[in-house]
Image (cartoon, grey):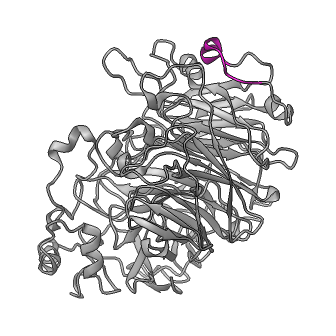
Amino acid sequence: MHTPSTRRTPNRRTLRIVGAAAVALGLAAGLQGTSVSSALAAGQDGDGPVSTDPGASSLLQSLFSATPGIVTDKSTVQGRDGKAYWLENHVDTTTLPTSVLDGLDLPSLPGGLGGSDAGGTVPDDGLRREYLVVWAGDNNVLDKSGAELTTLPKSVGTDLIGQKDLVGPDFFAVVDATKGSPSYGKVVNTATVGPLVENEPHHMQYIWHKGNNIFAGGLFTDVTYVVDTSQLPKLQLKAVNLPTDTLCGSVPDAYWVTHDGDAYGTYMGGPDLPGPCTYTDGSVRVGNGFGGSPGELVRLDKEGRTVDEAPAATEAPETKQRCDNIPALPSPTCANPHGVQAREDLDTLVTSDYNEPRNIILNPVSSPSSYLRRPTVRTWDISDRDHPKLKAVSFLPDGPRVGKVPHQEEPRAAMETTVTNLPGHKGAFAETMQGGAIYYTPDITADQPQWREVFDLTTSNKLTDPNSTYYGGGSNGGWLQTSLDDKYLYHAVVGRPASGDDLGSPPYILKLDIQKLLASGENPQCTIDTLDEVTAGGAESDCPAVVDTLPAKGGPHWGALDNLQVGDDGYYHETTDVKRLAYANYFVARTGLNGDHRVCMVDVQPDQTLALDEKFRDERTGEACLDFDRASWPHGDWGPAKPHSMLFVTADDDVK
């Protein structure tokens, strides 16, 4: 990770170099058993990912016809492996006024626009822009679930690099999220990353604050991208954190950015190589390899450098509930951290363990054991910010419902956790993707936090669709977030696909009122311990109450709260009074939970219920929500994409 350099690329004319580029890459390796990412990285020369031919500046970025009005701008950094990594903007100047693009140091368009005069072709509306930055993956022939394995290519070669269903670049979509803007809901920039492809873009941090970089993970490539947002709609790559920068962990999942701009990242998978691994503090754990166990917590500085690798596993075996590892480890562990949130004022961070990823996420076949789904939540002491220490491992308790399969028992697959925000509260929530339950502890600072089930998705499944098989197990809950004023809890639910006699359960966004639960302090009464409560909600007066269930066809997995609000001065200010949120319908294609690849906007009504924003429409279909299954993007005709996570962001100069 070194200081980035910026190379501005002129707007390209139509390039037809598919054959030549494929030959150039193919000569380097037969690619039998070689990954596309490795081949591209091996062929790049720092100025383009593959070819040294000046007429073919890059394979991935030149297989399309340039679109009028698209201006490109490329930033490049050098990784610790000595290779070049880049991010290339493709700003659609036809959608934005001059006032938005001035001063971004964009290259010239034919006709003289550019540099300090770079500007769009629409009238100046006087609005400062807010954006939704979406981390999205190219959808291609490799996105196969277990049911589709028979059509999976036997090897990955140069014939798979190209447009539409073939392998293309992953990217950040910058979407105009400014209400009242003529380009509201339009993709105004796609910033592609290279030379790595098939990153499987996953999570960024949960919320953005002024001055923050974006930390974005590649699930399959084990890479964290650090992106500067200060000049939106243009992005700039600041750094990459590579597999060799985190030898004791793999499969980066989620991030939490602290007040100083540094971050914590959960690396769900095991060490890069099987065997003993030595962490920053000198301790040693034995792992079963990349994508296995145990995972770790990584401290990253704002430049993307690894500051600390902290083991998520205890030295003693974790056996209170069954924790399978494949291959088996001498000390069984459930340490596969996924969700991460922190309370800096309490010097405490919470992570939730989801699964041993290579056997579920990285492998497009059915999991060989239900007990790879984890029932654990971990609390960490972060009083020394740069050296987090594991404090407690909590096994979530089982509930009254009997799972139809073992991994649908309530505590299984603890995907997400979310902390409370206000100084008077010390609690946190956790949810289980396969277990279909929500848990709460009133005090994350306790030596051993006490977690209790406070809600079963059976209740909200039935309210959303009483004609479904509303049993909560396998409901595939994902994003979980407390409102910034600690009044409500938001939860995205993909739903359970229909199968045989099972009609499945519905997809929706759930909103719960948690004010009474938090008001109960350290002695909450709510607990889901009867079958009646599973279906009808908790019997105790402080149990979370359903405010709304917003049907969300397509399967919402992830969401984000909009913490920015325009003031009377025309600038954005951070707020705890959230008026809208966004969600995306995509999990991981290889698991079979592919979703319909749409990003939707939701308004919070005055009565706190939720309503789909019908004005946030796809510019091609005219329908509500932004459809990522499209033929063309600002970066070319690459076909459908997979939007996983998103953040509400604005340029630094536009927020006070």
- The stretch drawn in magenta includes residue 536: yes
Indicate left or right for 303 with 35 as reference.
right
- Between 595 and 564, the one lying in front of the other is 595
- Between 610 and 214, the one lying in front of the other is 214
In the rendered image, which quarter contains the C terminus? bottom right
Q: Quadrant of residue 80?
A: bottom left
Q: Quadrant of residue 487?
A: top right
Q: Residue at x 22, y 52 (%)?
A: 141
User: Where does residue 641 sit, x and y in percent of width and height?
Assistant: 36, 52
User: Where does residue 253 sit, x and y in percent of width and height?
Assistant: 50, 56
Q: Is residue 556 visible?
A: yes
- Between 246 and 457, the one lying in front of the other is 246
- In the rendered structure, which segment of residues is drawn in magenta? 526-537
User: Where does residue 132 sit, x and y in percent of width and height?
Assistant: 56, 55
- Between 623 and 58, the one lying in front of the other is 58
Indicate left or right for 615 with 194 as reference.
right
- The stretch drawn in magenta includes residue 527: yes
Above or below: residue 545 compared with residue 173? above
Indicate left or right for 258 with 485 as reference.
left
User: Where does residue 323 sit, x and y in percent of width and height?
Assistant: 48, 43
Q: How many marks?
A: 0
Above or below: residue 469 compared with residue 429? above
Q: Residue at x 58, y 44 (%)?
A: 416
Q: Is residue 613 visible?
A: no
Indicate left or right for 425 with 191 as reference.
right
Q: Residue at x 20, y 44 (%)?
A: 149
Above or below: residue 441 compared with residue 86? above
Q: Quadrant of residue 514?
A: top right
